[in-house]
Each structure stands twice: as C-alpha cells, then as structure tokens.
Image: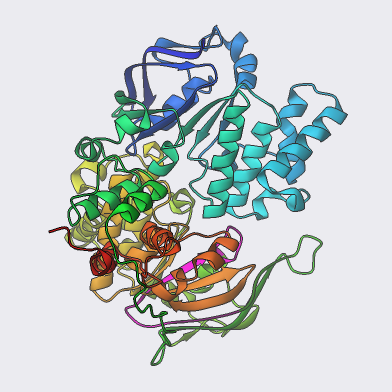
Amino acid sequence: MSALIEVNNVTYAYPLPNGGRIAALREISLRIEEGEYVAIVGANGSGKSTLARLLNALLVPDSGCVTVAGMETRDPAHHPAIHRTVGMVFQHPEDQIVASLVEEDVAFGAENMGLPPAEIRVRVDEALAMVGLQEARLRPPHLLSAGQQQRVALAGVLAMRPRCIVFDEATAMLDPAGRRIVREMMADLHRAGLTIITITHFMEEALDAQRVVVLERGRVALDGPPETVFADAHTLRTLGLDLPPAARLACTLRRHFPALPTGLLTVPALVAVLDALPHHAAELPVTQPEPSPVAGTPLIEVRDLGHTYMPGTPLAQRALEGVTLNIQTGVAHGLLGATGSGKSTLLQHLNGLLRPQEGTVRVGDYRLDDPRLDVRAVRRMVGLVFQLPETQIFEQYVGDEIAYGPRLQGLLGDSLRERVRWAMELVGMGFNAFKDRFTFALSGGEKRKVALASILALRPSVLLLDEPTAGLDPASHRELLTHLQKLKETGMTLVLSSHQMEDVAALTERATVLVAGRSILDDSVGAVFAQGERLRMLGLSTPIVTQVAEGLRARGWPLPPGLVSSTALIEALSRNLLSTD
C-alpha cells in the first residue's frame, strides 16, 4: 500500500483575540496508507478534530507539513483536489449543510465538481438510499432531528465519491440503529477500497478499525491494532479513555470469576467464554419482570400531548401524538426512542419552551397549557440542557456564561462566585483553570460541561437532559454520570433523553419508549430492557449486561430477563455456575 496521507512534524495552535494561542497539535507525525481503516481516539481537547481538519486542508499547519496524495496542503492551488480526495463528515452536521432541501444539499458537492445532471441524480439517489433518507429528500434540513441532519451530511460526502472519508464523531447524535448503519457503511466503503478515518469516543467503534491511534494533548500516545491498544486498561484510563463496554464488563466479571481470560473485547467473545464454564444444564425457574405501576401524585404529568411543527403548511410535520407520561418527584426517568421519535420535542414541553397545542402538561403546580402561565417561574424550577450545547452558550468567557443565570436572579459578589465555583466543580471543570477560558475555544465535550454547569448554577429542582453525554470522552462520560448520580441522591428529579443504553441503565429507575411521536412503553428500566427484540426492531438496543444475559439465555442458561447491572449479572451467573473445587 502507498501512503495516501502523510503528517510530518506538524504543529498547530488556535489564535486568541488577546493575541495568545492555544496549542492543539504538537510536532505530530502520522502516516495513513491507501485503503487503510484507522480510528483516532483521545480525550476531549486532545486534538482529534484539529487533526481531521488538517487532513483535508480546512486548516494548514503552523509548522511541519501535511501531504495528501502527493499534494501539500500549504499550496492553495491543491485545495480543490484535496477536498475531492478527502471527504469530511463533521461532528455537527449544520456546519456543512448549505441548501434548503435535503436532496439539494446532497447534490451540492457533486454539482461543484461539474458533473452532468444525470450523474448527479444517480449519485444523490444512491447516497440517500445508503443513509435511509429517501423519504426526507424534499424536507428542509433544519427541520430534521440532529441524527437525521448527520445522515444528510454523510450523504453529501458519499455523493462526491472521495478516496478517503474522515468521520469526525459522525455517530455521536445517532440512535443505535443509525450507528449500526453508519458502522456497516464504513466497513462496506472500506471493503470497496476507500480509506476510512473515524474519530470517535465510542471505543466499540474503534474495534471496527484495523488500527487505533490515541492522541494525548496534541501528540500520538499509542498507535497499533485494537487488540494491542485495548490490552492495557490502566494506560487507557490515564489517557482519559476506557475499554470497549464488553471488555470493561469482562474485567468486572473476571474479579469474581478468575477463569475468564484476558483480551475479551466483544459480547460474542464474552458469551462464548462464559458458556464454556461448567454450569447447570437443567433449567431453573425464570420469572418475568412484573409491570411496575407508578404510585402517588406525579410531579410531572403529561396527558394526550400532541405537537405539529409548521402546522397548516405543506411542510407540517407531526412530532408528538397522544403522549402520556408520569414522573414522580426525585425519580430519574429515561426517554428512549429512535432519531426523530419526539424525545427532544417532549423535553421542550416540560419547561415551557414549547406550549401544548393538544393535551395537557403539568409540572408541580404549573399547568403549561394555561395561557396565564408564568413561564419564567417554570424555567427556574425546570432546567433544560440542550442536545447541542453551543446553542445555549453566548458569553465570551466560561465564568461569565455560568454566572449569567444566577446574576439575573439577583445573586452578586462572593455568593455568585461560590455558586459558579460549585456548578463548575460539579461537572468536573476546575474553577481557576476554566473561568477565564474563551467559550469558543473549548472542545465539544467542554462546551457540554459549560452548558450543564450554567443550568445547575440556577439550582433547579428538575433537570432535563437531552443527550447529555454525547461528545464526551470516556473519562468525562464517567465523571458526568457520577455527578448526575450525586444530583439524583440529593432528591433532584432527572429526565434523561439518551441513545446510550448504558447511561439509562445506570441512572434511571423508569423509562418511556417513544415511536413516531407516540409513547408505546412505560415501565421500570428492567422491564423495558427485558424486551430486547422489540427494542431492536424499533431501532434501539439494550445495555451490554443485558446483551450478555440474552446471549447466555439463547444458549440455554436460565437467566432472568431484564438484567441491567453487572451486580445483578454476577449474582445470576453465580447461581448457575458449578463449583470447580
């Protein structure tokens, strides 16, 4: 194989308005071969997205050089050819969506290549089919969900048929089915001869690659095949990363069942090894989880809620249809559903950003369908952290952004400073280290922490979280879950919308599943995840623990359905394993 991309001793720093610079890459060297499949991982702020932009000449190095197919990116004359050679799917799809209709946006790049209309039509049709957006071709992209916008951006790149595609967190906003589709697409494109570079915080996605490159503070810390890179859990944790979920579960199980070998990275591998251990052959009684009704008066009550975007126009889109929901005080409640199922729309009804068109919404003593409602009072009680944190950040400095809400409430001086410090430390941002940082210079994960801290600084009694861990590196992910668990222990009511089944299993007691704007399932988390096959048909998935239990149950193990924690799995395995003494 010949090198398609060469990065030689490259340094890059972002300029600041005050004349300073923030170093993103430091004397980094990297060689990517034609037809290779490479995963680039690293903690937030390690330089992954900066490196991606250097690979297709969106940025040029401060020193060193980047060469793509023999063309140096410093020469502007090479840029059009480099852009055609290396396609880019950004972390935030709105950064590359330019047209008013989906099919026009997908055609944009191909049109700029000067292709004939008939060829453009063929490529657009193929690309839309590959990402599953044929039915949305005549819709405005800005009316699509974040996950659907990501598919539009990917389709636009596929229509250009580049030699290399760089995916910068391209699956971060997608539902499990969408992630599977994109991963399969990457594999298919790689088999077709394309060079694939994926930047991801999902360690299980890195397993798909032939090679994993780990960045730390702008330098290459590790570089090798997945089985080598993921062999040392301790080193990965020091780099702000983690093992893939199945490997992490295997490590937990190994502490109780020492016979398990090392190097188990996937669910099938873990299931096969567990099944090889001596265990009961005869079936033991297995009970189905009982439905778990909600008792008492709920804090949040939604009845027959319906919502249509742009009603009365040709672009009308039904988002919610007869949704019913009850959430008790102090309970953490999960919202599950495929991309476009209505989760974000429902959340925005719970703090008055959207008002009921049909049905009723009550939060505490507030009726949100009452035209006399004091919306400000509702929003002091109910805080919402958006799916895309940058949409709610508008101050120049981190400290000012987090202080904005409490200052409007009349908090001043030392009290305001301590409130900001408390909120920042709660999300893992050191007060002195971050208070004077420019918000625009933060990584995506750091912006998410700022957005969460700015809401927590208001001390709401209900916290609505729309995909709170999307874009976070594994260390920040763990840290945020720990903080949210502490908030839950204080009695705060949490409502969590997430495509991360592990997060829902770890944080919530109950869950509601939305399909095409309807609430079709509402029960305890265990009872919901016990319906694994149904969830997969709806474009969802189950936690790794549940997947392992399902795999063993399929091999005849009498394990109860709905296992969602490693503790429960260990207890179930212990009852079935035979003693080897």
Counting the numbered discs, the total is: 0
- Left or right? Give the position of 346 relative to 438: right
Quadrant of the image for the C terminus? bottom left
| Residue 223 % position (x, y) | 33, 24
Q: Is residue 141 left or right of residue 278?
A: right
Q: Nearer the viewer, residue 557 or 143?
A: 557
Nearest the viewer among 373 and 215 is 215
Asked if residue 287 is positioned above or below residue 337 in the image, the reply reads below
In the rendered image, which quarter is residue 402 located in?
bottom left
**Residue occupying the point 46% across, 73% down:** 528
Residue at the extreme right = 118
Q: Position of residue 18 (x, y in %)?
A: 33, 29
Q: Which residues are magenta?
A: 323-344
Note whether 462 is above or below 223 in the view shown.
below
The image position of residue 351, as x and y in percent, is 47, 72
Asked whether 340 falls inside the magenta stretch, the response is yes
Q: Is residue 423 left or right of residue 57?
A: left
Q: Foreground residue, 132 or 144?
A: 132
The answer to whether residue 490 shows anywhere in this view is yes
Q: Nearer the viewer, residue 27 or 452?
A: 27
Q: Is residue 557 above or below residue 172?
A: below
Give percent across and percent down for residue 17: 38, 30
Q: Could you tell me if residue 20 is visible in this image?
A: no
Q: Residue furthest left?
A: 581
Quadrant of the image occupied by residue 420: bottom left
Q: Does the magenta run of residues contain 425?
A: no
